[in-house]
Image (cartoon, rainbow, N blue to C red):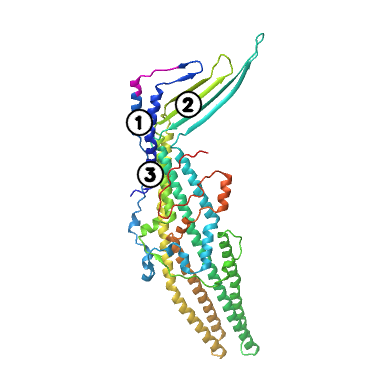
Amino acid sequence: MTVVPHYHSSEASKDVLKPLTGLITTLAAQASANLRLRAESVCTMSVNPLAMRAAVLAWAVLLSACTTVGPDFKRPEVAWLEAWTGGSLKSLPAGVQGARSAHTQEWWYNFNDPALALLVAEAQRVNPNVRTAGIRIMEARAQLGIAGSALYPQLQQATGDAVSAGEVRSGAADTNAVTFSAGLQIGWELDFWGKFKRGIEAADAGYFASIAQYDDLQVLMAAQVASLYCSIRTLEARLSIARENAAIQRRSVEIAERLFKGGAESELDVQQGKAQLFVTLSTIPQLEGLQRQAENALSTLLARAPGPLPEMATGKEVIPQAEPSVIVDVPADLLRRRPDVRAAEMQLAAQSALIGVSVAELYPSISLLGFVGLSATSLGESSRALSWSLGPSLTWNVFDYGRLTNAVLVQDARFQQLYEQYHDAVLRAAREVDDAAVGFVKSGEQIPLLADAVQSARRSLDIANIQYREGLTDFQRVLDSQRTLFSQQDLLVTTRGDLTQNLIALYKGMGGGWEQGRARPVLDDATRETMRQRSNWKNLLEAPLPAPGADVPPTPPKRQTP
C-alpha cells in the first residue's frame, strides 16, 4: 500500500522543466550571435547552424530523460495489526460500545465537569511544551520554503569592485588609474535525478511530522490534566474518609477512657485505641502532601506558579465519572490515526526521501551558468566593455573513494532504524489501548464488590460497638472493625479513581483529543508579534493548520522578493 498520496512534488518539477526546455532553446539560438560589445567596436561570431541544432536536440533529450532516483515510500506493513481485534476492548460491556463522535474527540466533556473542561482547554493553549511544538511547525514551514527554493536558480550573485592603482617612476611622469567592474552571475542546477524533488518530499514529510507531534502533545495535555484533576479529587475524597474515620476512632477512645476510669476496662483498651487513632491521623499529612504535589504538577502544566488552583474550589471530593463513549473501530485504523504513530510514519517518509537525495549525488550534476558584466577604467587608451556568457556545465564526482556510496548506506541505515521505531510505536499504541481497556473493565468489576464490602464493614462496626458497650465482646473486635472499615472505604475511593484514570488512559490510547487544536491559532498574538518584529516571517505565522484528515501538503512556496 503506497503511503504518501500527498507527495506531488514531481508535478511541480515537471511544470518548472517544461518552460525550461523552451528557455534553453531560445538561449541557445541567441548564443549563435555570441557578442562582445565594446565602446569602440562590435564583433560578431558565426556559429554552424547544424551544430546549434544538434546542441538544442541534445538538451531536449536530456530534459525528457529526467527521472527521480531513490525509493518511493510505502507505509510499512504490520502483519499482526490487520488481524488484531482490539484485545481487551472486546470485553467492554455491550452498552459501552459506541461510534466515533464529537464527544470522543473532546472526551473530557463526557465527565460533565466545567472546571475540568476549562483546565484542559487552558493547558492545550498555554503549556510551554505545546507552544514549543507550535514553533517547531513554523520552523518546518521555513524548511519547506528552503527546499522549494531549490527549484529556482541556486546561484544569483551580484559582484562589483573598484580598484585604484598607480605607478611612480624615476625620471618619468607618474601614472594612476581607477578600474571599475560590476556583474551578475547565475547558476541553475537542473533537477535531472530528482534530488530537489526528494528534498521537497523530505521537508514536506517533516512538516507533517511536526504537525503530528503538535497533535500528540494536545492528546498528552488533555490526558495529563484530566489524570491530575482526577488524582486531586481522589485525594480529597481519601482525606475526607481519613478524617471521618479518625473522628469515629476518637469517640471509641473516649468511651474506652470513661470505662477505664470507671474501673470497667483495663488501660490496654485505651492505649490500643489511641495507637490506632494516631496511625489514622498520620495518613492525613501524607495525603495532604500528595494532594499539594498533584496541584503543583497541574499548575506547571498550566504554566502557572506551583500552588493550589482556584478552579478546584468547587466540586471538592467528587471524583469525575463518565459514561465511556468508547470507540469500537477497525483497530488498524484506530491505531494508525494516533498522532504519535502518524509522526513516526512521517519521519520514516522523510528519511526515505533523503535516501533519494543521497542517491542523486552519485549522478552527474548538470547546470546552466550565465554571466553578464560591465567593466571600465580611467585610462585614456582603455574603453568600457560589456561582456556576457551562457552555457551548460557538468560536474561528476567520479572518484569519491566510497564517500558517496557510503553516504547512501548511512541514510539507508537511518531509514531502517526509523522503520523499527515505527513498529515499536504501533506495538506501544496497541499495548496502551489494551492495558487501559482491561484496567477499566476490571476496575468496574471491583467497585460493586468493594461497595458491598464497605456496607458490611460499617454494619460490623455498628454491631461491635453495641456489643462492646453491653460487655458482650472485647475492645479488640471494635478496633478490628474500625480498621476494616477505614481500609475498605479508602480502597473503594481509590478504585473509583482508578476507574476514571483507566478511562482517561483509554481515550489517550485511542489518540483522542487533538482535533479541536487544528482550529486554534498555533501561536498566540504576543508570540506572533514578537517573532514578526524580529524576522520577516511574511504570512507563515498566520497560515492555519490543515483540517483533520486533510493531509494535503502546501504547494512548494514561490520565490518571494524582499
Q: Nearer the viewer, residue 128 or 280?
A: 128
What is the secondary structure assignment of the residue under circle 3? loop
Please state if 422 lies on the left or on the right of 461 as rendered: left
Left or right of 189 in this view: 308 = right
Tell me how far mark 3 sits from mark 2, CA to CA: 33 Å
Q: Are marks 1 and 2 in contact (CB under 8 Å)?
A: no
**Residue underneath mark 1:** 62
Disc with the residue nearer the chain's start (1 vs 3): 3
Q: Which residue is mark 2?
A: 371
Q: Find disc 3 in the rendering and name its residue.
A: 8
The number of numbered discs placed on residues in the rendered structure image is 3
User: At which x and y percent is residue 133?
Assistant: 51, 52
In the depicted structure, whether residue 298 falls above or below residue 353: below
SS label for mark 1: helix
Say whether disc 3 or disc 2 marks the residue closer to the N-terminus.
3
At label 2, which amino acid type do we have? Answer: Phe
Q: Residue furthest bottom?
A: 470
